[in-house]
Image: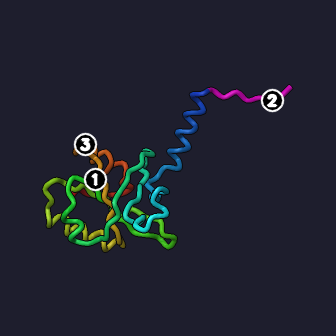
Amino acid sequence: MANKRTISWNAAMRDLRNDRMRRAGVREERLRATAGLRSSSTLSSWRGRSGRRYIVGVHPLNEAELLEVTDAVILAVKRDRTGNGIVVDAAMAASDPSEQTRMRWLAKVQGLGATELHIHRLAATEDDRRAIFEDLRENETQDS
């Protein structure tokens, strides 16, 4: 007689979801499709806490880049010693940017060690941007 363990499909799927949630955390996942390209550092992706993936453009952390962004989710990112991206802070860019608010946010994230802006522009509505913002932030953040 063979010892066979029977597992219900529902239990297996629940365990898989729970395992994914335990591993879940906001993390950068480099795009494999751009690995061999010369300009591959201009695109990347982030995996949210939900497991959804978001494509972002990578930009230098400077005033000009930040002030021209509208209708997007912005991640301030720093790199660790191995080159992995770490989200320092996140913000939502409205259609009418407040220069003063953005400059305060820029100073804050620079003080926290951010060196890059990762900008997700593919969300069509304010509600979509809010959902993405909530999915990609891990700690206290603000709107801009």
- Mark 2 vs 3, N-terminal side: 2
- Mark 1 vs 3, N-terminal side: 1
Q: Is residue 77 above or below residue 14?
A: below
Where does label 3 land, which residue? 127
**Which residue: 50% across, 45% down?**
21
Secondary structure that dominates the magenta span:
loop
Label 1 CA crowd tier, 10 Å (few <14, some 14–19, many 20+) = some
Residue 30 magenta-drawn?
no
Question: Which quarter of the figure has residue 90?
Answer: bottom left
Which tag is nearer the camera, tag 1 or tag 2?
Answer: 1
Residue 5 magenta-drawn?
yes
Where does label 2 land, which residue? 3
Which residues lie in the magenta part?
A: 1-8
**Viewer-side residue, 28 vs 130:** 28
Where does label 1 land, which residue? 121
**Which residue: 41% across, 59% down?**
44
